[in-house]
Amino acid sequence: MSADPGVMERAASMVKVLVTGGAGVGKSCFLRAAQRGRATLLGQPGAVGEVGYAALPSGATVVLQVTPEQRRWWWMWDHLALGATGAIVLVDTTRLPVSYPALDYLDACDLPYLVAINRPLGGSRNRHEIRDALRVSAQVPVLTCDATEPDSVLAILHHLASPARPPQHHIRPSQHPLATKGRRLS
C-alpha cells in the first residue's frame, strides 16, 4: 500500500509551534491574529485547548498550540511540546517575571524558542535590556511584535518556522520547572 503523495506533502509542510508566556501577555490575541481573526478555541482564552493554524507565504502551515496558564494544567506542557519545532515566548515588558516559568520550561526541555516582545502592552526597555532581564542566551532571538496585527504575528512565525531553523527536537519528560523554583526566580 503506497502513501498518498498529497497527504505526505501536506504533512511535510506543517510545523508545530508552542505559544507561551505568562498570564495576560497576548497569547490569545497572537493566535487570533495568526489566523486573521478565525481562532479555533477548544476552551476559554487562557484555558487548556487553545489551538490555531496559520498559513505562511512559503506555503507551510503552522499549528499553534497555546500553553495553559493555570498551574493545574502545567502537567500538559510535555504533551503539547511533543513534535514541536519550537516555541514563541510572548513577553510584556512591564511584567517580565510572568514569563519566567515558560522560559525555564523551554530551557529544561531544550526546545528552540524565540522571545517576542508584545509592544502594545507598554514599556520602554530595548531588546538588549529585555534579554538581560530574562537571562536568555545570545542565540535566542529577541524580536518585537504586535500580537494583534496579523502581519506582525506572521513575521514572527516565519522567523521561527523558516527552513534555516533547527529540525524537530524530541522533548524529554521533564521534572516540570513550572512546579519548582526556576533559575530566573532565584
Image (cartoon, grey):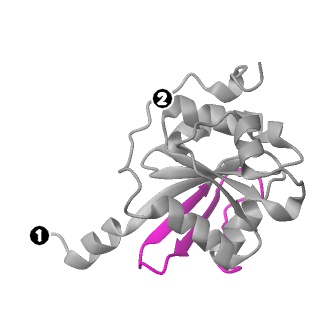
Viewer-closest of 118 and 76: 118
The kind of residue on which mark 2 rests is Pro
**In magenta stretch: residue 131:** no
User: Mark 2 sits on what residue?
Assistant: 173
- Measured along the vertical axis of the image, is residue 134 above or below residue 89? above
Which range of residues does the magenta coloring cover? 36-65
- Measured along the vertical axis of the image, is residue 84 above or below residue 175? below
- At 75% from the left and 44% from the top, the residue drawn is 130
Instruction: Classify residue 42 as left or right of residue 174.
Output: right
The kind of residue on which mark 1 rests is Ser
Q: Indicate the position of residue 35 as horizontal and vertical percent values.
A: 63, 76
Determine if residue 106 is in view.
yes
Question: Element type at marker 1?
Answer: loop
**How would you rate the neighbour count of disc 1 (Cα within 10 Å): few for under 14, some for 14-19, many for 20 or more?**
few
- At 46% from the left and 72% from the top, the residue drawn is 61
- At 45% from the left and 44% from the top, the residue drawn is 82
- At 60% from the left and 65% from the top, the residue drawn is 156
- Judged from this view, the residue extending furthest toward the left is 1
Tag on residue 2?
Answer: 1
Instruction: Count all numbered tags in the image, as a single digit.
Output: 2
